[in-house]
């Protein structure tokens, strides 16, 4: 039940009748028409822009359209008033029965309330984290993991068929560096003194890997040249690092459907096939690039390369796919990887990158546009940096990682639920301050506590009702006389519940799961505010002397908890039954 969609349908149906009656011209486009909450709740329950968007194409004044539309809408029993504001906006007030019915719908549908059909079963691939398999995940990966996972859940809730995917960057030179670093730990495990040259990975997390390698091969690689062991150790170390990464993700509550190896693209013809597809479309050629911005011509050595004509698909410059020595550029396997995604039949691709990949967005979008013939959209979401604080000071590096704060450092400090919620309290492309002390505070300023406390408060009401012998199963509550919920404070909570299906659709359409966290905070605020009013107005309390009245009041509380649980489920957070 999406009351905003229902009222929009009412508006467009009424406009269609006005066209049929000849009061509006034919051929008008109703797509831009909206029905949404007004910026100021005092103006009404909903506002529609219909008169404003139709005035110019209809060749009429906005107020003239608004006056005709208002008189027609007022005839519908759902509408109690339709008032014109400003140059032609229309503010609508709805009968309380519309809002009271929301609680019944929520109780009947449970956490499925708000599930949408926006996705229409379309297949979407969400690729996120995709960290190099060279060490534990750091706090930047944590934000990308939480954002990507919540986005995947949001899209699933909105009716998409979602695949969660991790692209293992195991085909580049960094994996050779990992192998050499593990070899040093392997030597160390045999009692040899080692030094870590610049560029290697000195973190303590490789100590266990070196010992595991010793247990596996004994002294077979000692005092042997790199050509003997690097291939085997590279594979061994990558597997161990991916085990570590999977374990870190599991601690955060993230489980992938697919782990895709970059290495699988090499020597299998997949890169060649992707570039052949582009070549057949006239998008691969031999050429010389202009010097990069900021580089003087005398410092630039022009050389012929194999180039992808990415400028034909929105990029700033064409991009090399093969080096002058015949080796692939780093872009070539990424093209092949996304070609594979297109071939797997996804209708939509989403990549979640760190902020440092901003310069990679246009070329990747150009590649997917070219590979799919413009039929498969690619949305790339960048996650900005996270600044960590503890006791008012920047949180120091992890000794185990060597150079950064790990995902496990964060989860071990505050738990996965707090980590996930706080990571979604800012839009993905905005900087985020993560204060270990503040995120554990029990105050309104801590959004995760505030939302969890609202759910726990409802749970306490249900427990007290059970002690009083009041039936509070969802079926009984749905059958209660919800017309008793007629106080403005109660209707305010119901109006907020009614926004949930619309919020889900908007958040999914924009790929912005942080909207869910914002909404949950607002819903929690409405519930807490209503609860506090009950301290002064006893008739607003959830448990009354009359069981029938109590059940109506508790229906409001329970339906709020259901929506909070559904929203937290999208964020990957477990609802709290009690707060300690």
Image: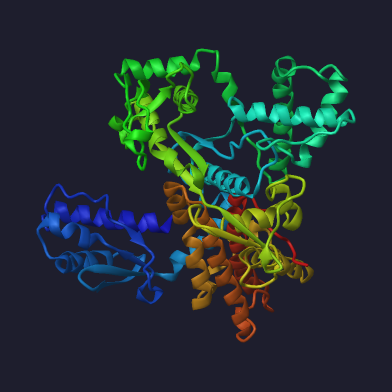
Q: Position of residue 177 (x, y in %)?
A: 66, 30
Q: Quadrant of residue 202?
A: top right
Tell me the quadrant of the picture where the C terminus can be found. bottom right
Q: Nearer the viewer, residue 171 or 8?
A: 171
Is residue 565 visible to us here? no
Please say if 563 is above or below 138.
below
Please say if 152 is above or below 486.
above
Q: Is residue 463 left or right of residue 386?
A: right
Q: Residue at x 76, y 30 (%)?
A: 182
Q: Is residue 464 left or right of residue 375?
A: right
Q: Is residue 31 left or right of residue 360?
A: left
Q: Nearer the viewer, residue 521 or 166?
A: 166
Q: Position of residue 543 (x, y in %)?
A: 68, 75
Q: Position of residue 544 (x, y in %)?
A: 67, 78
Q: Quadrant of residue 578?
A: bottom right
Q: Nearer the viewer, residue 258 or 89?
A: 258
Q: Residue at x 72, y 28 (%)?
A: 180
Q: Position of residue 10 (x, y in %)?
A: 31, 57
Q: Nearer the viewer, residue 7 or 194?
A: 194
Single out the residue that lies furthest toward the front: 298
Single out the residue that lies furthest toward the bottom: 536
Q: Residue at x 59, y 24 (%)?
A: 171
Is residue 97 visible to us here? yes
């Amino acid at each position: 039940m999406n009351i905003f969609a229902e009222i929009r349908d009412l508006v467009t149906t009424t406009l269609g009748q006005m066209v049929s009656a000849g009061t509006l011209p034919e051929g008008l486009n109703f797509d831009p028409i909206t029905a949404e909450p007004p910026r100021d709740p005092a103006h009404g329950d909903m506002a529609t822009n219909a008169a404003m968007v139709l005035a110019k194409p209809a060749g009429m004044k906005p107020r003239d359209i608004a006056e005709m539309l208002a008189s027609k809408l007022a005839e519908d029993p759902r509408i109690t008033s339709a008032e014109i504001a400003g140059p032609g906006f229309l503010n609508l007030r709805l009968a309380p029965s519309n809002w009271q019915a929301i609680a019944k719908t929520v109780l009947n549908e449970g956490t499925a309330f708000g599930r949408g059909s926006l996705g229409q079963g379309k297949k979407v691939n969400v690729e996120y984290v995709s960290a190099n398999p060279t060490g534990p995940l750091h706090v930047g990966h944590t934000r990308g993991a939480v954002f990507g996972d919540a986005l995947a859940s949001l899209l699933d809730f909105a009716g998409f068929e979602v695949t969660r995917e991790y692209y293992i960057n195991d085909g580049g030179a960094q994996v050779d560096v990992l192998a050499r670093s593990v070899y040093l730990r392997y030597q160390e495990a045999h009692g040899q003194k080692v030094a870590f040259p610049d560029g290697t990975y000195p973190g303590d997390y490789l100590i266990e890997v070196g010992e595991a390698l010793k247990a596996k091969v004994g002294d077979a690689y000692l005092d042997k040249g790199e050509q003997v062991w690097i291939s085997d150790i590279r594979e061994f170390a990558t597997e161990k690092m991916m085990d570590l990464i999977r374990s870190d993700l599991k601690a955060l509550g993230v489980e992938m459907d697919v782990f895709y190896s970059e290495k699988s693209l090499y020597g299998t013809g997949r890169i060649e096939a992707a570039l052949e597809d582009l070549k057949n479309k006239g998008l691969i050629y031999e050429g010389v690039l202009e010097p990069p911005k900021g580089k003087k011509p005398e410092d630039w050595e022009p050389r012929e390369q194999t180039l992808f004509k990415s400028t034909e698909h929105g990029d700033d410059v064409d991009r090399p796919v093969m080096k002058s020595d015949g080796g692939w550029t780093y872009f070539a396997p990424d093209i092949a990887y996304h070609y594979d995604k297109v071939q797997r039949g996804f209708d939509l691709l989403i990549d979640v990158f760190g902020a440092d990949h901003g310069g990679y967005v246009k070329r990747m979008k150009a590649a997917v546009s070219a590979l799919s013939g413009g039929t498969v959209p690619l949305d790339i979401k960048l996650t900005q940096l996270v600044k960590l604080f503890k006791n008012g000071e920047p949180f120091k590096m992890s000794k185990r990682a060597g150079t950064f704060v790990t995902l496990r450092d964060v989860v071990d400090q505050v738990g996965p639920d707090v980590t996930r919620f706080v990571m979604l309290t800012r839009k993905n492309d905005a900087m985020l301050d993560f204060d270990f002390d503040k995120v554990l505070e029990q105050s309104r300023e801590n959004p995760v506590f505030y939302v969890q406390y609202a759910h726990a408060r409802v749970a306490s009401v249900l427990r007290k009702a059970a002690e009083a012998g009041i039936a509070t199963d969802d079926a009984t509550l749905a059958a209660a006389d919800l017309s008793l919920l007629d106080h403005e404070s109660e209707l305010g909570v119901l109006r907020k519940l009614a926004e949930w299906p619309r919020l889900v659709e908007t958040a999914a359409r924009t790929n912005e799961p942080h909207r869910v966290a914002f909404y949950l905070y607002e819903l929690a605020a409405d519930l807490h505010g209503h609860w506090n009013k009950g301290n002064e107005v006893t008739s607003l309390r959830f448990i009354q002397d009359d069981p029938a009245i109590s059940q109506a009041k508790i229906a409001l509380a329970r339906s709020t908890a259901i929506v909070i649980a559904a929203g937290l489920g999208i964020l990957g957070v477990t609802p709290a039954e009690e707060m300690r």
